[in-house]
Amino acid sequence: DTEVTQTPKHLVMGMTNKKSLKCEQHMGHRAMYWYKQKAKKPPELMFVYSYEKLSINESVPSRFSPECPNSSLLNLHLHALQPEDSALYLCASSQGEDRASDTIYFGEGSWLTVV
Amino acid sequence: AQSVTQLGSHVSVSEGALVLLRCNYSSSVPPYLFWYVQYPNQGLQLLLKYTSAATLVKGINGFEAEFKKSETSFHLTKPSAHMSDAAEYFCAVFKILTGGGNKLTFGTGTQLKVEL
């Protein structure tokens, strides 16, 4: 099973709302990721968690707040977003090994629209 | 910094024809390279990856790619296109992060259209 599950699939939120995106994997992976994909663009890395600790923040604005409650779950808390934050948010996971055999598996994504 | 360039944002082929999607890398050391596919309104699925074990890499759905150091290329091919191959294809370079985890940096993508 190489499944990464993301909820919700679609989310519409106002600029003053607080919402969260959720991600779950049961592959025993120790690294989890958030990528952002704007329309017609490639995915771009936002955050990396390794062994439940934030290891990389790619200069993401503080209105995006990641959380890793345990090794299987990854959340992305959203607050005071802007319309330009509308995008597909992809969660991913991998074994977290520091070698190229470490395949990164992606979820289906959560489509976010900020109005 | 390592990067990849995908030539051709749109490629159109007839069903049954050869598929060739181009990817060139920029790196001072041999990179680890991946091809992912993204079907409409879906996430990314790994097609294949090059990790220096073999220069010709076979992936899923009949795709393969050949790593050519002399040309700094890792082009994706499939002998015979099928309608179901219509999707966005991303070439990516893989970087091991010192803090844990790894990073994929994607090319701009190639939209493959398959016509009857």
Image (spheres, coloured by chain):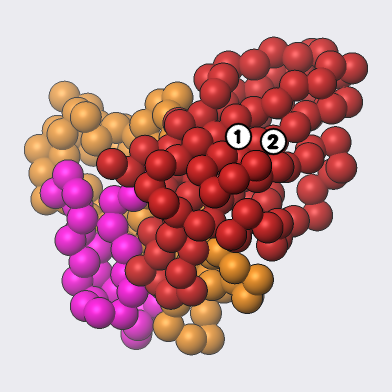
| Residue B81 or residue B46, whichever sits in front | B46
According to the picture, the residue beneath numbered tag 2 turns out to be A76
Helix, strand or loop at label 2? It is strand
Q: Which chain is orange?
A: B
Across and down, in percent, residue A102 comes to 40, 64
Query: Which sits in the foreground, B35 or A5?
Result: A5
Image height of B27 relative to B15, above or below: below
Discs 2, 1 touching: Cβ within 8 Å = yes
| Badge 2 density bin: few <14, some 14–19, many ≥20, Cα 10 Å | many
Determine which quarter of the picture holds residue A4. Answer: top left
Q: Is residue B49 magenta?
A: yes
> What is the chain identity of the residue bearing mark 1?
A
Please name the residue shown 37% across and 38% down the image. Answer: A3
Quick one: SS at disc 1?
strand
The quadrant of the rendering that contains the N terminus of chain B is bottom right
Q: CA distance from mark 2 to mark 1?
A: 9 Å
Question: Which stretch appears magenta?
Answer: B45-72
Q: Residue at x 33, y 43 (%)?
A: A2
In the rendered structure, the answer to whether residue B84 lies left or right of residue A51 reads left
Q: Which residue is mark 1?
A: A89
Given the image, what chain letter belongs to the residue carrying mark 2? Answer: A
Residue B31: give its label. Answer: none
